[in-house]
Image (cartoon, grey):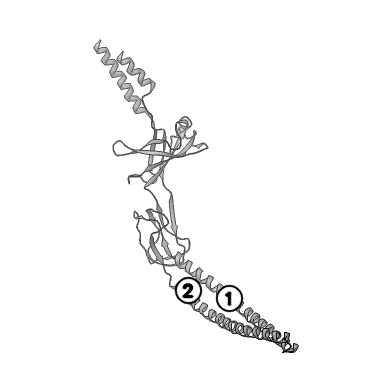
Amino acid sequence: MKKLLILISVAVFGSLVSCGKDEKADGYGNFEATEITVSSEANGKIEFLDLEEGVILEKDQKVGLIDTTQLYLNKQKAIASLKTIQSKSGNVLSQIAVLNEELKTARSEKDRIQNMFSENAATQRQVDQALGKVNVINQQIKSVGTQNAPILNEVKSIEVQIKIIEDQIQKSKIINPVSGTVLSKYAEPGEITAFGKPLYKIADISEMTLRVYIGEPQLPQVRVGQKVTVKIDLEEGMKDYEGKVSWISSSAEFTPKIIQTKEERVNLVYAVKIIVQNDSSLKIGMPAEMWIKKSGVTGKQKSTKHQIKK
């Protein structure tokens, strides 16, 4: 009887082991990250580009500079022109100030003569002359003011030119847009670059995204925010990571050729994105598996254990 129980136990254990070996992952895919290609926003010679592949950069870190000599000289030229034109406007404003003083005096004289006229101490002619002088000075002020209008417009135009040059100077500074690791470097100091020419590629790989594809049977078992197990191949065995589902496709698509076998490529699958914290072992494009976490044992395993006890 003991021998019979031993044989049954060995057979059941062997069956369980073989079932474990036949288990398949719930999804297969590759790691990816948001890659950003930083391009030049100016034309000219690269004065310096302080970065190398694999270096971690911070957001808003200054990593390079494109020659700004011509821009600086153009700015100084514009500033000199602005000062010249502003001096012309200053002369016009001085004339207006003098006329305003004359107008003030003429108005006082007009008021005095009008008071004298009311007391029969001045003639109507004197009143008309005083009023006419006030009107003449007002017209002179308007005339001089119209001379200043085109000068002010020219001042505004040059001020806009200076702002454009300052913006070009600012864009000549190569500022890193995001925190991350430099993946590729496309330019070197001393080279001539142009607007839109790629300088380097960067990505934040501290947190990787695993895009996997699952079949319709697994779809009800996966939800956004759910924690899953992610596995990668090692020289011996596999390494586990904890992942979190961040996105599930709302529509089905044909299985990509790089994911499944030839027979399975005709199946419709759903894309799923899983966020995984990178311990520097994960690389862009690296294949990985997703395993949906299951608690407890299957009904088959429970019934088998019950038979052994019996």
Drawn side of residue 39 relative to residue 129, left or right:
left
Q: Residue furthest front?
A: 119
Q: Quadrant of the C terminus?
A: top left
Nearer-the-camera pick, 114 or 160: 114
Drawn side of residue 76 relative to residue 50, left or right:
right
Amino acid under disc 1: Leu
- Residue occupied by mark 1: 152
Which secondary structure, mark 1? helix
Amino acid under disc 2: Lys
Residue 148 is situated, as x and y percent measured from the top left of the image, at 60, 79
- Dot placed on the residue nearer the N-terminal end, 1 or 2: 2
Q: Quadrant of the N terminus?
A: top left
Q: Quadrant of residue 22?
A: top left
Residue 183 is situated, as x and y percent measured from the top left of the image, at 38, 53
Nearer-the-camera pick, 243 or 266: 243
Q: Residue furthest left?
A: 2
Q: Is residue 255 visible?
A: no
Relative height, residue 295 to residue 150 (above, below)? above
Relative height, residue 154 to residue 301 (above, below)? below
Mark 1–mark 2 CB contact (< 8 Å):
no
Residue sitting at 54 percent across and 79 percent down? 86
Residue sitting at 50 percent across and 76 percent down? 78
Mark 1 vs mark 2, CA separation in Å = 19 Å
Q: Which mark is residue 75?
A: 2
Query: Circle 1: is it few (<14), some (14-19), or many (20+) Cα within 10 Å?
Result: some
Query: Circle 2: is it few (<14), some (14-19), or many (20+) Cα within 10 Å?
Result: many
Which secondary structure, mark 2? helix
Residue sitting at 67 percent across and 82 percent down? 139
Relative height, residue 16 to residue 285 (above, below)? above
Q: Residue furthest top?
A: 1
Q: Quadrant of residue 210?
A: top left
Q: Quadrant of residue 108?
A: bottom right
